[in-house]
Image (cartoon, rainbow, N blue to C red):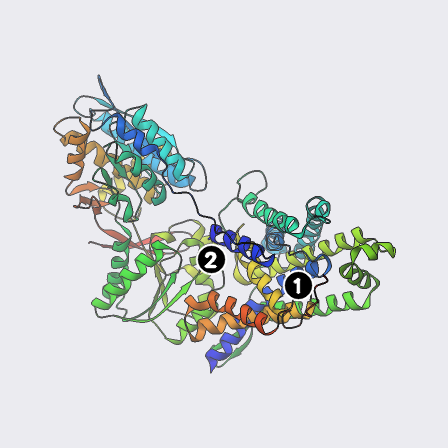
Amino acid sequence: MRSALAVILTSCALALLGCEKKASVPPPPGGPSGGTAAASSGGGSGGVTGDTILIGEIGSLTGSEATFGISTRNGIELALREANAAGGVKGKKIDVRVYDDQSKPEEAANAATRLINQDQVLLILGEVASTNSIAMAKTAQPAKVPMISNASTNPKVTEIGDYIFRVCFIDPFQGYVMAKFAHDNLKFTRVAILRDLGSDYSQGLADVFKRKFTEMGGKIVGEETYAKGSTDFRSQLTAIKRLQPDGIYIPGYYTDIGVIARQARELGITAKLMGGDGWDSEKLFELGGSAVEGNYFSNHYSPDDPNPRIQKFIADYKAAFGGVPDALAALGYDAAQVAVDAMKRATSLERTAVRDAIAATKNFPGVTGTITLDEHRNASKPAVVLEVGKGKTKYVATIAP
Amino acid sequence: MSDLAQHLINGLAAGTIYALVALGYTMVYGVLKLINFAHGDVMMVGTFLGYAVAQKLGPERQTALWGVLLIFLAAMAACAAMGWVIERFAYRPLRDKPRLTALITAIGISFTLSYGFQLDFGPLPGASPRAFPEIIPPTEWLIIGDRAVVIWNWQVISLGIALALMLMLQGLVYRTRFGRAMRAVSFDHRTAALMGIPVDRIIALTFMLGSALAAGAGILYAIKDTAIQPLMGLYVGLKAFVAAVIGGIGNVPGAVVGGLLLGLVEEFVVGYSSSSWRDAVAFAFLIVVLLVRPGGLFGRVAAEKV
């Protein structure tokens, strides 16, 4: 959006003055670092020296998404402490080298190159943002270094190659989760969709929701779109109000949802709003106020889930870092646990053997659900549905794949 | 039928904000023949200043009448000062340079403000959005039927302010000495200077007035749409620019009519065709208006002096 506007502004400025118009083309992401990494250590036993195993972690510890990286860091740290306290892997302690990518894909690619060439790590954990994970994966895959993303849900991440895994579900699954919840739990038959026209995330979730909800026998009564940056959704909402739906599916980000909820209430809309993990932020409560309460979204995990495994994780996390772990901390914890489990099961501490062991992960009991990695190296596991309450969310249901 | 009425109200409310921002564009263009692309970002800065004052006042005092006035006046005064600084140090040195130079500088200032404000440093707000407090607590002004159509107090207040400002500006331009000086500078600033008009002061004052207007518009925008963030100025600024051009840039009533028309066109496109068409139709509308009336609805086409 920013660059698009920049192009529009610049080009209309130039057009006004009768100059030749040139569209600016953004540089390709990733960078050339993949090639050099590939040349170094193909499938070796990187990171294993004497009695330690060195693994790498890349996260957004500073920059716009710093909370993502810090939560992940804590989750990974907790899992590794527990693993080392329990005797480590094959008699060796696990050591982690952490690099900050400042929430930027080019830094993520640089950090991956450093981890692979200089530190020679056995495997890499991270990132949260899909763009950063893709940049890392493009470096890790040619070097044949296994990588586990904790929270990147864009399907493209693991499509980069057979050394790239993730422990979270992918975007299309969330669309299914909410369709099932709306149909089975809420008994909705008429749902309208409001989607962010320029977001792959929003489009992906909305498409799947539409297909699945229709297959289940529900009816999509109307579809509206909005453009990122807009803060006036009244026209779309007025059009939706006329259709009298039971619910409105809005797979957007919390930045828009709060405002949409306020304007929906202002227009007298009583239909429930539903969305995906893009809603998950403290800011949702600030932007939406009381208007956003009573609506539902799907997420990776809920701290209210009564499952004893989850409650033990929360207690341990509180003791170690203070505060309730968010979904990203839980996913970081699971990513590290899956890595440790695979290293234990691997026939040797060679990268290829570890890769094979990660790929064979089946029914692993994580805190974000039972994790099975499918043939596309994505985690197949349940999602939770949360209800927005006053300043916090409430666990409602778990939906299995 | 009630849908039609509701869409009409939505469209007018959205158009009011475009109109208010467009007034500032038009003022500056009228005098300087400069499209001040930083105008939307000045609006953003004004909104954040209003937000800061409201936070300082706290929930009790920010809704009192004097509190609301203080929020508006403080933000408008600070933005006027910022407008002066921008004009003095970015535009004035370039006044006799080719127009493209000033235009590119304006885009540079726009980006400096919108991206600078995303830094999380000192008093800067950082990138994440904030909820502007409800300094005018929303109440239903008029309810038709079983809440089929609702008109809110702030919608009436905003439209009233926009129309009042339009009349005041029109009076200022055509009925005061300052306005006459503005028109003279606009006509030919070198000749105006020869006639003893303090050109620099007139231009600086126009900029300050435009920037103060932007701050006021920004706070009304925030009252309407709640979420404020550093990139908000780019989007609103672009729409307001289109509104100003539709109405005839440089023309005060034109800016208001253009803003309201654009708001209504966008609203009815979404309401009665598809929301994906919204921006495409809005910009196509601009093209059609310019094809039929190249100077905009209220603008005059000046013969180019060769």
Pick the quarter of the image with the C terminus of chain A.
bottom left
Q: Position of residue A176 (x, y in %)?
A: 25, 59
Element at badge 2? helix
Image height of B115 relative to B29, above or below? above
**Quarter of the view holding residue A367:** top left
Within 10 Å of the Cα at label 2, are there few (<14), some (14-19), or many (20+) other Cα atoms?
A: some
**Residue picked out by circle 2:** A289
Q: In this rendering, would A48 be left or right of A128?
A: left
Which numbered disc covers residue B23?
Answer: 1
What chain letter is assigned to the residue under label 1? Answer: B
Q: In this rendering, would B110 be left or right of A98?
A: right
Q: Front-most of B90 and A89?
A: B90
Element at badge 1? helix
What chain letter is assigned to the residue under label 2? Answer: A
Q: Position of residue A109 (x, y in %)?
A: 36, 35
Q: Position of residue A229 (x, y in %)?
A: 48, 56
Q: In this rendering, would B28 be left or right of B196?
A: left
Q: How many marks?
A: 2
Q: In this rendering, would A311 be left or right of B240?
A: left
